[in-house]
Image: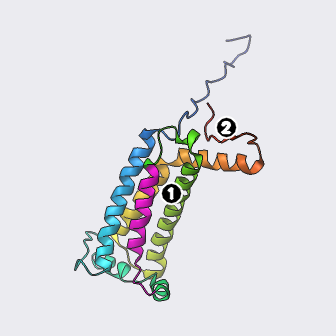
Amino acid sequence: MQNGHKYNTTPALPAKPLQNPSAWRYRLPAFALAVCGAALSVYLALYQYHVVAAVWDPFFGGGSVVVLNYGILRPISRALGFPLRDALLGAAAYAIEAALAVAGDRRRARTHPWVVVAYAASVLSMGLAAVGLVAAQGAIVHAWCTLCLVSAALSAGIVWLSRHEIAAAAAWICERVAGRRKHPQGNALVRE
């Protein structure tokens, strides 16, 4: 019994606030997943451009061929006059994501908040694209591709690993929009 009360009324210690959402311990695993995603997307693009004859798929067999040959970007390819394939776009997006993951030092949330905002936008757009492509496999193409699902899982993992920086970027944008930043030194995502 404490302070004459029947129950312990001592407040629990608050969880330690995240001091640095840009720490390398968060960014390096996301970088590694982005590099894996880029390599996987390059392999799928090589199949889509007929550089390799077959694509490996241990679970869905011919489903990968159906998915990869579906041609979601065919109308855009015709308009551009260039055979644009979704796996090639995925490889480029993963490469951008990897570059943004390692851009800046461990204090980039404080020193370069726009890099963090660009990284968060890249991560979220890749996560949404992954959800859309998985949904398209089931709802439109009616076939599944193992490596495409692995790519989507990599994107989901990157979103999870980057959640702290995404939250810091969102908070910084909200504060900027609300006009709370009055001086040039106040553009940090994390308070000192």
Q: Residues within 10 Å of mark 1 (few under 14, many from 20)?
A: many
| Count of marks overlaid on the render | 2
The location of residue 156, given as percent across then percent down, is: 46, 57
Magenta run includes residue 21: no
Magenta run includes residue 98: yes
> Which range of residues does the magenta coloring cover?
81-101
The location of residue 191, given as percent across then percent down, is: 63, 34
The location of residue 133, given as percent across then percent down, is: 46, 71
Q: Which residue is mark 2?
A: 185
Mark 2, secondary structure of its residue: helix
The location of residue 130, given as percent across then percent down, is: 47, 66
Q: Earlier in the sequence, mark 1 or mark 2?
A: 1
Q: Mark 1 near mark 2, Cβ–Cβ under 8 Å? A: no
Label placed on residue 1: none
Q: Quadrant of the C terminus?
A: top right
**76 relative position to 144: left or right:** right
Q: Which residue is mark 1?
A: 123
Nearest to viewer (mark 1 / mark 2): 2
